[in-house]
Amino acid sequence: MEAFPIVNMEKLNGEERSATLKLINDACENWGFFEIVNHGISTELLDTVEKMTKGHYKKCMEERFKEMVASKGLEAVQNEIEDLDWESTFHLRHLPESNIYDIPDLQDEYRKVMKEFAKEIEKLAEDILDILCENLGLEKGYLKKAFYGSKGPTFGTKVSNYPPCPKPDLIKGLRAHTDAGGVILLFQDDKVSGLQLLKDGNWIDVPPMHHSIVINLGDQLEVITNGRYKSVMHRVIAQTDGTRMSIASFYNPGSDAVIYPAPQLVNKDEKENNTYPKFVFEDYMELYTRVKFQPKEPRFEAMKTIDTVKVGPIATV
């Protein structure tokens, strides 16, 4: 079996740059996922984020989760649950406007740490997008501009904990789906596993690694790259032992950004066949929220029937 792609980002700065770019390109074309190390975010910051996130869950969320489980009788289920995920979450919005001071129960120091973490992840996301541009033969900055809309990108973080589950064969931590947006950067637990992606009909574990960041591609990058890069189905398997931490940051297009295949990546035949649609990101999200756990292809087809504005070339100045 092929090894899950792990990329040492430091190698982009030396003689192995070409081979490292090729590894990233292969991962984007064939996996939709890769894991990066030596990415420039300090290990001290990551350790603090992990410590404070786990502490916040224990103090403010664990008991509420147990009460929810008891109220729904989930510990005694006999049949597979298909409309619920075994996760405890809260969402931070960073761009275009932050909601970090609106989230109850967060300690001031935790807010400060998460703001610093978000700033580092935002920079890393934009660096990743420029690496993808280089591999795709697009002008530097093309993908960032494609995401920009009138107010800049949408950027937020889903903070999740997956507690021990008594019936992991009947309740998923998170049901299988592709991500709707652009590029996703995940800081995950390095001791408790659970994340899996679907490749060639098989579910493959995404290996937990200390201080790594997992990158995966969303539906919008599949559209903009005209299918050269793919968004991939993934899921979280609940575990019987240990609580898994997951901090997933989503660098997505702005709500009014118009998404369509980059003209440089579309050949003459494909122009006539219109494989991928042109649409406003907000319209796509409206559909996605209703059918998140269904295949992406019908979503793409549905967007072809929605009228959208005509757009000119994307400026990369």
Image (cartoon, grey):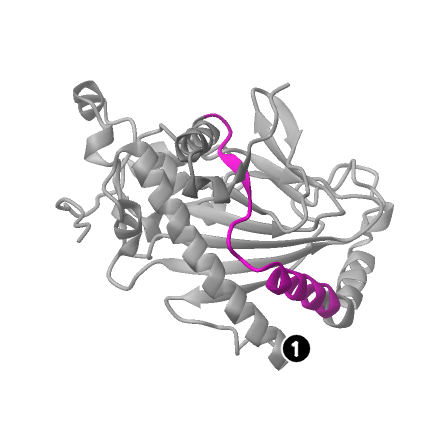
Q: Residue 308's x, y, as percent?
A: 21, 46
The crowding category of the residue bearing disc 1, from other C-alpha atoms within 10 Å (few below 14, some 14 to 19, many at least 20), is few
Q: Is residue 59 left or right of residue 252?
A: right
**Residue 285 is covered by the magenta coloring:** no
Q: Quadrant of the N terminus?
A: top right
What residue did someone put label 1 on? 105
Instruction: Tell me the element at label 1.
Output: loop
Q: Is residue 223 visible?
A: yes
Q: Is residue 266 left or right of residue 94?
A: left
Residue at the extreme bottom of the image, as rendered? 108
Residue range (magenta): 30-56
Q: Which of the pair 164/169 is nearer the observer? A: 164
> Residue, x 80% and y 67% (percent of image)?
63
As drawn, 255 above or below 287? below
Q: Which of the pair 313/40 is nearer the observer? A: 40
Q: Which of the pair 71/235 is nearer the observer? A: 235
Q: Residue 67's x, y, as percent?
A: 80, 64
Q: Residue 137's x, y, as percent?
A: 26, 33
**Residue 51 is covered by the magenta coloring:** yes
Q: Which of the pair 75/31 is nearer the observer? A: 31
As drawn, 3 above or below 138? above
Mark 1: amino acid: Asp
